[in-house]
Amino acid sequence: MQKRTKAHHELYDAICAIVGKKYVVDDEFELIPYAQDISYFHGVMPGIAVRPGCTEEIADIVKLANRKGCPIVVKGGGNAGGGVTHGEPGRNIMLDMGRLDKIEVDIPNLKVTVGGGARLSTIDDALRPYGYYANSVIGPYFSATAAGLAAGICGAGFSKNVASMGCNWMQIMGVKVVLPNGDVITTGAGPDSNINRDSIFFREVTGPDLTDLFLSSGGAFGLITEITQKIVPMPKVMKSISYVVPTMEAAWDISLELSAMGRVPYSNSMMFEMKNYLVKPIVGETDAFGAYLFSVECDNEDEANIRIKEISDVCEKYGAECGNPKLDWFAMNGATGTMQVVHDVGANSCPFMTWESMFPRARSLEYTKGLLAAFASVPGHRENATGAGLYLIPNGESFITGVTLRSGFQTPEAEQHLRDTWAAGAKYMRDMGTSSAYAQGTNSQYIAGAWSPTYAKTMGLIKKALDPNGIMCPGLWNL
Ligand SMILES: Cc1cc2nc3c(=O)[nH]c(=O)nc-3n(C[C@H](O)[C@H](O)[C@H](O)COP(=O)(O)OP(=O)(O)OC[C@H]3O[C@@H](n4cnc5c(N)ncnc54)[C@H](O)[C@@H]3O)c2cc1C
């Protein structure tokens, strides 16, 4: 038998009594996977990791943690890139939500209720036989969890059709949450949520709705154990088209014009800078600036063709040329979210420091140029080969600029360089009044550092009211 390297966590026996011994680990070796996210931010070793099976077990653990003053941190799929929650290193109770994976499909009411730990791809697996899908990520489709996405990133996530449907928060009807004192509430059905409704109906009712307090919160105000989300019929016709665009200016002109149409013609639109590792090998050597991928989802072929023509007219007006068949294939598989590309390529793209930030559409180009200049200003930028190219996703009144920072080397110097580059980008974003999308660890602290005194005070009061013992994800948002 393997020898333990440390004494049991102070709450080991009590937690085992709640969830069963086989769902608890607290030896150092077993805790390593829980210490770090995918970024180069320094990790934090928890004191114990627990895999609860239901909301009630989580509520019992939270009550226990309150009695003992022991911090709780949480992990869904572990795809965070903004740093882990600090808490109390060596003492944190890490809740691994993966066993909360129930999926209840409700076709007549066009919704699905899923456990907070359900992996995003499994939700679509459950819906596909009925001809529906849930709009979720393009990226970590197979690994991120429903609650990790809802709580861990701004807007509750950038969906596969973010360019036409907006961020995921619009799809979320309500959440079940274990509050920091162990109480359980369900949001989303108005003030009578917990009185006489056994199900989330809708959140557009009279009365304050608390759903948004928990979305993009990182878990600072409670643990999401269940999410009810709208579902979308699968399109009858899916088409894709790609374009190679000559300049950065032309790339922005195309998105500005297409996204201003009354009915945007695409379901999704993504532009990758040519040096991005996802498109460069497909296009080969070229002087062009970037590659546009468009997907179109419709009920019939004629409408799809009209939309493709609308896209083509605008692209060609700005000097873009049709992409090659491989790029079209990427548009279909990457931008429409059949996810094969993500499955094959996305999983290999870590570790990195990544940025997705939103900026008002009219000044997005200027903002993005400034962001690139901020990265490039860090000494050693070229030597460390930092940067894998940017991407652009139009999203209504704001555009999403994504930059994946990667280094060609895995040396301590290269890792430090990535952290320095992160700091330079974060400062630029903060100065410009925006931030990286991650509602996570280090990044949340940096964002909260820019809150106005009144906003910080309000957040502090909410935190104090909900979490008087300060046990829920301490350190997030500097709370
Ligand atoms: C390769 C790659 C591609 C990506 N592409 C996309 C994309 O296309 N669109 C997009 O929107 N995002 C994308 N992301 C970002 C990713 O969706 C977020 O980091 C998301 O938060 C990860 O979810 P997770 O389940 O892995 O959460 P984790 O990494 O486990 O946790 C993330 C945060 O959520 C909190 N949290 C987790 N579970 C709960 C819970 N039950 N209750 C309360 N708080 C909780 C944690 O405290 C933490 O702060 C990508 C990430 C990677 C690595």
Image: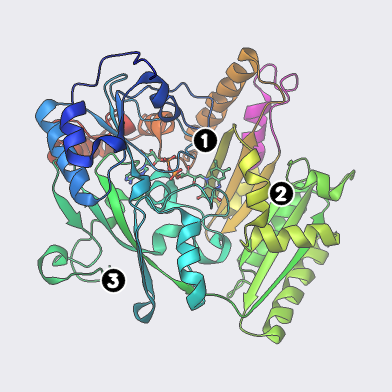
Using the rendered view, name the quadrant where residue 361 is placed: bottom right
Can residue 277 be seen here? The reply is yes
Q: Residue at x 21, y 34 (%)?
A: 16
Q: Which residue is mark 2?
A: 272
436 on left or right of 293: left
Q: Which residue is mark 3?
A: 202
Placement of 287 over or under 406, stated as above or below? below
Q: Residue at x 70, y 84 (%)?
A: 301
Amino acid bearing label 1: Met
- Image quadrant where one finds the C terminus: top left
Place of residue 157 in the rendered image (x, y in percent of width and height, measured from the top left): 46, 52
Q: Nearer the viewer, residue 320 or 150?
A: 150
Of labels 1 and 3, earlier in sequence is: 3
- Image quadrant where one finds the N terminus: top left
Placement of 463 over or under 139, stated as above or below? above
Of labels 3 and 2, earlier in sequence is: 3
Can residue 461 be seen here? The reply is no
Which contiguous range is marked in magenta? 367-388
Place of residue 13 in the rendered image (x, y in percent of width and height, measured from the top left): 17, 28
Q: Secondary structure at mark 3?
A: loop
Amino acid bearing label 3: Phe
Q: Which residue is mark 1?
A: 429
Q: Residue at x 21, y 47 (%)?
A: 178
Cβ atoms under marks 2 and 1 closer than 8 Å: no
Amino acid bearing label 2: Phe
Q: Secondary structure at mark 1?
A: helix
Q: Which mark is residue 274?
A: none
96 on left or right of 396: left
Mark 3 to mark 2: distance in Å?
37 Å
